[in-house]
Image (cartoon, rainbow, N blue to C red):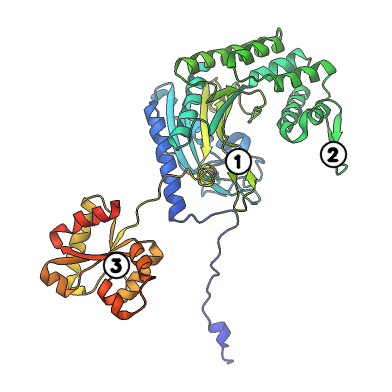
Amino acid sequence: MAQKSKKQNKPFRPKARRPRGFEDRPADVMRAEAALVASAFAVYDSFGFEPLQTPAFEYADALGKFLPDEDRPNVGVFALQDDDEQWLSLRYDLTAPLARYVAENYDGIPKPFRRYQAGSVFRNEKPGPGRFREFTQCDADTVGAGGAVADAEMIMVAAEVARAAGLGDDQYAVRVNNRKLLDGILEASGVANTEEGAMQRLQVLRAIDKLDRLGEDGVEALLGEGREDESGDYTKGAKLNPAGIRAVLGFTTASDPDREVTLATLSGLVGISDRGKAGVDELAEIDRLLTATGFGPERVSFDTSVVRGLGYYTGPVFELELLAEITDRKGRPVRIGSIGGGGRYDDLVSRFRGQAVPATGFSFGVSRFVTALERMDALVAAAQPPVLITVFDRALLPNYFQLASELRAAGIRAEVFTGSGNVTKQLKYADRRGVTLAVLIGSDEAAAGEVTIKDLVLGAEMAKAIETNEEWKSARPAQQTVSRDQAVATIRDMMSE
């Protein structure tokens, strides 16, 4: 019998590799994201919203418009077939699970139902720069409240979240539009309420969304017959008539810093369209409530160029946008733009119940928001590193853990070194952890009822000027010995300096 080769006997060792489109998030990122979510949750709580946690998996058919193909339910979403042969999918967002929850518990929940939630969502899409298959969203929604009052409140929530995240009022803006306005203008321009008309509306939305990149002339071409770009590619236009093109272009430039001026301009543009008039009335109600509560135009403006998901939303729609100057690592200007938004969506819950259930909400991507805050130097201070209690003598472990407990009771992070190695190796560990204070208690200190506290940062600076062992021994840079009963107070004082 042939002897097995050494290669065949070698145990299988999988290659350590991270799946494409997924991230590992280290401690500093996790702390920043947790702080941002906590700030947003505090705002949601202050407005009377309640937390809700839905599962990461939903039945695939509950995802509605996000399920691209009934025969291939794992396209666009991550899906698997359960033992009862029903397809389960990782949630695509937090809104579809909310709609399912409301429909399933409709008779037992108060209405309006006001909830907030944060959690991972998943997209089975090709990953790329800044495009991930898993990311965290943080949402607040009101289900069961029609009219612009709930929308106005959600706009206030967005502005307050920006403030709670540490942004100044000159560093962000909430920009508001209304789906009904453009519908009214297109209706007045002769776009039919048919399937063909719906395609025209979609083309108009796509054209408006390119206003920043193509300018008015490029958008005008896309609203008409079409446009050929520099590469020779031709994009078919929406084929609006000249009057319709003028009306849409007038709509995109109707915004004014004064919200009342914008409302007056829009009233003229929508003409006799009932849907357009309803859109103006809703913005007027939003303006009335914002003005009464001190949300001036420097925080919230009406901006008709906002087309955020107008094909999904049914009424007011808004974006939270960063205004601050941001540069990349090479000093080049970077435009972050929208970091969150929301609006009214009245059709989602009706999929389950067959009856109209109004809803409005706000959502932001946590990682994107944190990245923006980091580039603006607006992140909250990182957590204080723990005080490291080094282990000189394992017989003194009870003493070490007792001191650690006292520090924690005083609100100070503390860690007893649980690895192996002498004090030199422990201090190297402290350096890699970013520890600033270390506690040294040997048998002599324990017998004398004392502890030695070493400032590692200051000690490193002082050590640069020490040239000999004699100087080192006499200086013992940046450390002090105090009585055991003064240890916690001394450490607190040293941390505050």
Q: Is residue 198 left or right of residue 433?
A: right
CA separation in Å, label 3 and label 2: 64 Å
The residue that mark 3 highlights is: 417
What x and y, as percent, mark residue 116? Answer: 43, 33
Residue 439 lies, in percent from the top left, at: 25, 65
Three-letter residue code for mark 3: Phe
Q: Quick check: 231 above or below 9?
A: above
Q: Residue at x 53, y 13 (%)?
A: 285
**Structural crowding at the residue carrying mark 3, measured as other residues with C-alpha within 10 Å and reported as few (<14), some (14–19) or many (≥20):** some
Label disc, if present, on residue 184 of the rendered structure: none
Q: Say which residue label 2 marks.
A: 229
Q: Nearer the viewer, residue 481 or 131?
A: 481
Would you name the residue on which mark 1 appears?
336
In the image: residue 227, left or right of residue 369: right
Under mark 2, the amino acid is Asp
- Ranked by sequence position, the earlier of labels 3 and 2 is 2
Q: Give amino acid for label 1.
A: Ile
Nearest to N terminus: mark 1 or mark 2: 2
Q: Nearer the viewer, mark 3 or mark 1?
A: 1
